[in-house]
Amino acid sequence: MRPCTVIASQLLFPAITVPAGFTSAGLPVGLEIMALPYSEPQLLGLAHGVEKATAARKAPSLSQVTA
């Protein structure tokens, strides 16, 4: 299975993945955003806005860390 990032990498477009939520099984889901070449500042601004608007990121619990 190919990763979802293959389109951006083949086109040489900048892309970023932001948290988009979780499945019913608790697995994380990401949203990849692509932009035109040399538009990284706008891409990062959009990604930041999406993260703030969705609040989909959940920090891992320290109790789940194993040594």
Image (spheres, grey):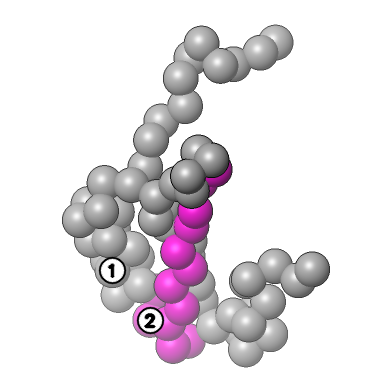
- Tell me the SS state at disc 2: loop
Q: Quadrant of residue 64?
A: top right
Q: Disc 2 designates what residue?
A: 39
Residue name at image x 26 percent, y 46 percent = 55
Density class for disc 2 (Cα within 10 Å; few <14, some 14-19, many ≥20) is few
Callout in the foreground (2, 1):
1
Amino acid under label 2?
Answer: Ser
Residue 31 is inside the magenta segment: yes
Q: Is residue 17 above or below residue 24?
A: below
* Left or right, 39 with reference to 17: left
Residue that extends furthest to the right in the rendered view of this protein: 1
Amino acid under label 1?
Answer: Leu
Residue 41 shows in this picture: no
Residue 12, image x and y in percent?
A: 61, 84
Residue name at image x 47 percent, y 86 percent = 37
Q: Decide which of 24, 53 is in the foreground and name it.
A: 24
**Over which residues does the magenta segment extend?**
27-40
Residue 35 is inside the magenta segment: yes
Q: Decide which of 22, 49 is in the foreground and name it.
A: 22
* Left or right, 21 with reference to 62: left
Residue 3, image x and y in percent?
A: 70, 67
Density class for disc 1 (Cα within 10 Å; few <14, some 14-19, many ≥20) is some
* Left or right, 46 with reference to 36: left
Q: Is residue 55 above or below residue 16?
A: above
Q: Disc 1 designates what residue?
A: 46
